């Protein structure tokens, strides 16, 4: 495959959406990833000033962050990161009004991120715990331990499968990456 063929393939796949290389390029930069985290779940545009202050606070661990850090974050977002994300169709950045909001390609990138805080229970963690609990309950039932022996192993298994299916349906239609926020 010639270089010109590779460029044509890359551009044609870009017309259908972002390539995996585009998504990797976006997510490998921590500041761009944090922008996406802050935009996740927002229905209203966020002012650039507010976004830069939040990112500066995260980066420094200080609230409010030092002025020079706020200005540095503001400038890098305004001059580099937001124009790049806007050009890729991931965010919509209104340069004149300094407003940022998710765009059409936003979900295509965030599907590769599990946007949660440390205090949240993700669906993947929930499914893991549900599976472990189901195995433990089925094991205790097969050994006739206490109340677990009151129901047979198949009854416990079907019960946990019903819970699993209902949970998957709920996750699918809610579209959240977080089951429960512990904050």
Image (cartoon, grey):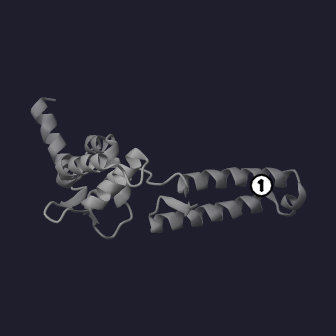
Q: Quadrant of the C terminus?
A: bottom right
Q: Which residue occupies 18% across, 52% down?
A: 83
Looking at the image, residue 61 sits to the left or right of residue 23; the answer is right
Can residue 90 be seen here? The reply is yes
Depth check: 42 or 15 in front?
A: 42
Would residue 27 be seen by someone viewing this image from the given angle? no
Q: Position of residue 93 (x, y in %)?
A: 20, 60
Residue at 30%, 46% in the rendered image = 69
Q: Residue furthest left?
A: 4
Which element carries disc 1, helix, strand or loop?
Answer: helix
Q: Measured along the vertical axis of the image, is residue 93 above or below residue 173?
A: above
Where is residue 136? Give x, y as percent. 76, 50
The residue indicated by pointer 1 is 137
Q: Position of residue 181 (x, y in %)?
A: 55, 62
Instruction: Using the image, determine if residue 30 lies above or below residue 175.
Output: above
x, y (%) of residue 105? Answer: 26, 57
158 horizontally vs 176: left or right: right
Quadrant housing residue 30: top left
Residue positioned most to the bottom: 44
Q: Residue at x 33, y 40 (%)?
A: 28
């Amino acid at each position: 495959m010639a270089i010109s063929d590779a460029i044509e393939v890359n551009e044609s796949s870009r017309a259908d959406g972002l390539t995996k290389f585009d998504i990797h390029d976006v997510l490998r930069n921590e500041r761009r990833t944090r922008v996406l985290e802050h935009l996740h779940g927002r229905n209203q545009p966020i002012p650039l000033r507010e976004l830069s202050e939040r990112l500066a606070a995260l980066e420094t661990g200080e609230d409010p962050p030092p002025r020079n850090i706020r200005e540095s974050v503001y400038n890098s977002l305004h001059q580099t990161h937001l124009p790049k994300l806007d050009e890729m169709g991931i965010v919509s950045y209104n340069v004149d009004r300094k407003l940022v909001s998710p765009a059409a390609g936003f979900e295509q990138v965030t599907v590769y991120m599990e946007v949660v805080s440390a205090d949240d229970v993700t669906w993947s963690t929930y499914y893991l715990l549900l599976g472990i609990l189901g195995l433990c309950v089925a094991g205790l039932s097969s050994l006739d331990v206490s109340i677990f022996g009151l129901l047979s192993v198949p009854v416990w298994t079907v019960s946990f499968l019903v819970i699993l299916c209902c949970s998957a349906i709920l996750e699918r239609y809610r579209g959240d990456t977080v089951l429960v926020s512990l904050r």
